Amino acid sequence: MDSAELADVLATVRAFVREKVVPLELQIEADDAFPAEVIAQSAAMGLYGWAIPAEHGGLGLNAEQDALLAMELGYTTPAFRSLFGTNNGIAGQVLVNYGTPEQQREWLPKIASGEVVASFALTEPEAGSDPSGLRTRALREGEGEAAEYVITGTKRFITNAEMSDVLIVFARTDPQATGTKGISVFLVPTDSPGVTVGPHDHKMGQAGAWTSEVFFDSVRVPGANLIGGQEEAGFRAAMASLNKGRLHIAAVCVGQMTRILDECTDYAAQATQGGRPIADFQLVQAMIADSYADLASSRALVLDSARRWDAGADRKLGPSTSKLVASEALGRVADRGVQILGGMGYMRESAIERFYRAARLFRIYEGTSEIQRLVIARQVLKGAHRQ
């Protein structure tokens, strides 16, 4: 996509987010759901497939373009981006990067259009930030074209599972393997016999973004549903998707900080104490300055990391550093936002209160801050920072 086309996309999304979605935030919070017309309009705009290659019906945005779009999407409740985040990100990218041509032709156009919602079923009760501990099993029966896999296990915190049509399921095909070995990945239609999706979780924040447990009770899938057509590609596929997902989440954090800073500056200019706008008070100004510094530095880091991703120069150190820095910065900016608004920042009708609760999750999903620090340290010790 050229720069003029991208500018049009970003302008259209910015207008939709700010004019349509932002006014609905309180309703979305109360209902824990999005109005059907928002979902339909999002699909019509191509938001279910911005990161899917154009040959499969998507917009084919590269990493830098993806980051710029994510910053616009992040200006409102992060649940909005979650509606289609798995299609573009961690679920869709497994098929983009590892699917066979037949799997890509069958699924990617439907994922890009929003006809199909895909979920990334990796996390388990004992395998979160470290997926090497997963216990879900996929045992092969038969050989050749008649081969089937029988999947048994439980997944947890699976985004969009309750509304999904297909699950990208990670399971051990070698029961003797441990750690990162023996993990494969499968396409499992959600309506397959033996698949049960639990009710969506009630979370601290991000109402409208649904996560659920998913149970697999001897679920049979044909061998053709083994993504990539080979076993033991699952861990590589998961890590590749998560690395790009970390860059995207960091960009969403930038969008969240932008919204919080706008809310704070608007409030500070209007609210008065002692007959003066609180924006005149130097300690308020200091909090605004610190928040802008967090926002600007995070934005620069994310865009630089995205450009290096597109150039093929770095696909580990930059994404993890961006995710760590931006998610931690978002927590500080959200906390200052509550402080600037004072009592109003603690009220449920305040956007700052909702963004404060939503911010906490960014330091957990797509790999916790602690995991990012481990990735960063390992890459630096290997000399990746010298490139």
Image (spheres, helix red, strand yellow):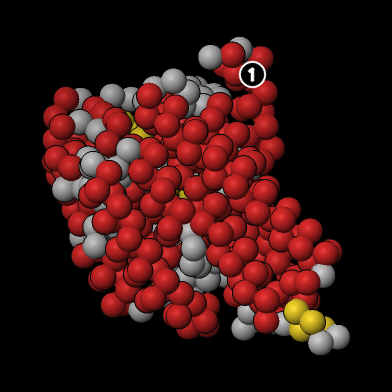
- Whether residue 73 is visible to the viewer of this picture, yes or no, is yes
Figure check: 214 above or below 144: below
State the quadrant of the N terminus.
Answer: top left
Q: Amino acid at mark 1?
A: Val
Above or below: residue 316 compared with residue 59:
above
Quick check: can you spot residue 111?
no
Foreground residue among 321 and 190: 321
**Horizontal and vertical percent for residue 381?**
66, 14
Q: Depth check: 353 or 136 in front?
A: 353
Give the percent coordinates (x, y) of residue 143: 20, 25
Res. 228 image quadrant: top left
List x then y, in percent, for residue 30: 52, 82
Front residue of 65/46: it is 65
Judge left or right: residue 339 versus residue 211. Answer: right
Q: Answer with the quarter of the image where residue 52 lies.
A: top left
Q: Quick check: 83 left or right of 375? A: left
Rendered residue at 62%/74% (across/down): 266
Q: Which residue is mark 1?
A: 380
Which percent across, then down, holds residue 350?
63, 79
Q: Secondary structure at mark 1?
A: helix
* Residue at the (32%, 74%) spot, across then down: 38
Q: Residues within 10 Å of mark 1 (few under 14, many from 20)?
A: few
Residue visible at 23% across and 49% down?
A: 5
Q: Nearer the viewer, residue 107 or 315?
A: 315
